[in-house]
Image (cartoon, grey):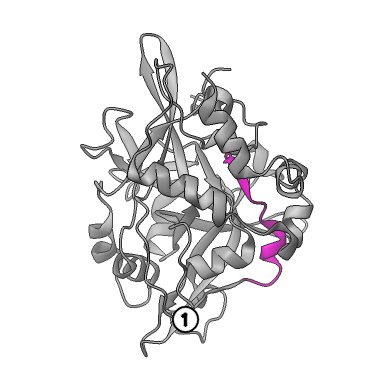
Amino acid sequence: MCGRTACTLAPDDVSRACSYKDKQGKRKCPQWRDGDNQKYQPSYNKTPQSTSPVLLSLKHFQKDADSSERVIAAMRWGLIPSWFNEAEPSKMQYSTNNCRSDTMTEKVLYKAPLFKGKRCVVLADGFYEWQRQNGEKQPYYIYFPQIKAEKDGLCWDGWRLLTMAGLFDCWEAPNGELLYSYTIITVDSSKSMNWIHDRMPAILDTDEAIQKWLDFAEVPTQEALKLIYPIENVTCHPVSPIVNNSRNNVPECISPIILNQKKEPTLSASGKKMLEWLQNKSPKKEESGIFKSSPKLSKFATSPKKTSASLMHQWLKKDDDAPSPKRPKK
């Protein structure tokens, strides 16, 4: 399953982090759909029903566009199908935050968007999962190993975003307002992750995989489904139970901790990379009006005494229950 994520980049940085090469080999950054950069709020602790950045083919919005061109949209987490006939999305009786890869070709909720080519890539810094052990739940933060990228013009050299395969749909409210929403596809966990949980998101590990998943006009459904499988190229570290409370939107949510030890932590290579990122590459809030409207994030961004890096150091030197998935009503 996947029930919590973190996505902390400013809108412009999300665009830069998603740069890709078009059919002519030119590197470009996908633009936000009109106004959607204002709907997205960066957060260390995103929950279902919140809004996240989603990558999809521009052709979904511009019929004359090449299906290989990409755009970023802000969408609600938790798919609301186009045929939903209630007045409010909150009246949805089923949890649609995740959809299982082994049944999505059969279930009415998902097979229509799937076979209509409504494929998307959900963007996040990483996601959280809880390991059950001895009656307790320990949260872990899971993300791509961070490898220094070569700079080439528009190429992003910051944090590599996790790219999760998803499906989306568009529901029209009684007042005519359109709501775009998505679900994250899940698969059996890979060997590197099954000790934490038996399910994980279907992660697209290469730009070629992302291109094929998004290009619904050129890549048929059955071929695209071959991209949906567990991958080993992820890493993780334990984090504080502070993330269990969805109201906690602070850097400590992603900070590494040491379990059952009192000595100073020794970070893995990826852990050190994340610490370096928080120290040197954290988003410049003054460049993005979005952060100013998020008091919990801007609290740490504007105070020189409480930067993400200093909070990280404080947390590492320090010598509620996890969310339960919403079950369908029977």
| Residue 69 percent location from the top left of the image | 46, 79
**Secondary element at tag 1:** loop
Q: Which residues are magenta?
A: 33-48
Residue 203 falls inside the magenta stretch? no
Q: For mark 1, what is the residue?
A: 153
- Residue drawn at x 51%, y 22% is 322
| Residue 187 percent location from the top left of the image | 30, 42
Image quadrant occupied by the N terminus: top left
Depth check, front residue: 261 or 138: 261
- Residue drawn at x 39%, y 58% is 114
Three-letter residue code for mark 1 = Gly
- Residue drawn at x 76%, y 42% is 299
| Residue 325 percent location from the top left of the image | 49, 28
Residue 289 appears in view:
yes
Up-down: is 134 above or below 172? above
292 relative to 322 in the view: left or right: right
Please tell me how crowded label 1 is: few (under 14), some (14-19), or many (20+) other residues with Cα within 10 Å: few
| Residue 40 percent location from the top left of the image | 66, 56
Up-down: is 311 above or below 234? above
Residue 46 falls inside the magenta stretch? yes
- Residue drawn at x 49%, y 65% is 17
Depth check, front residue: 56 or 281: 281
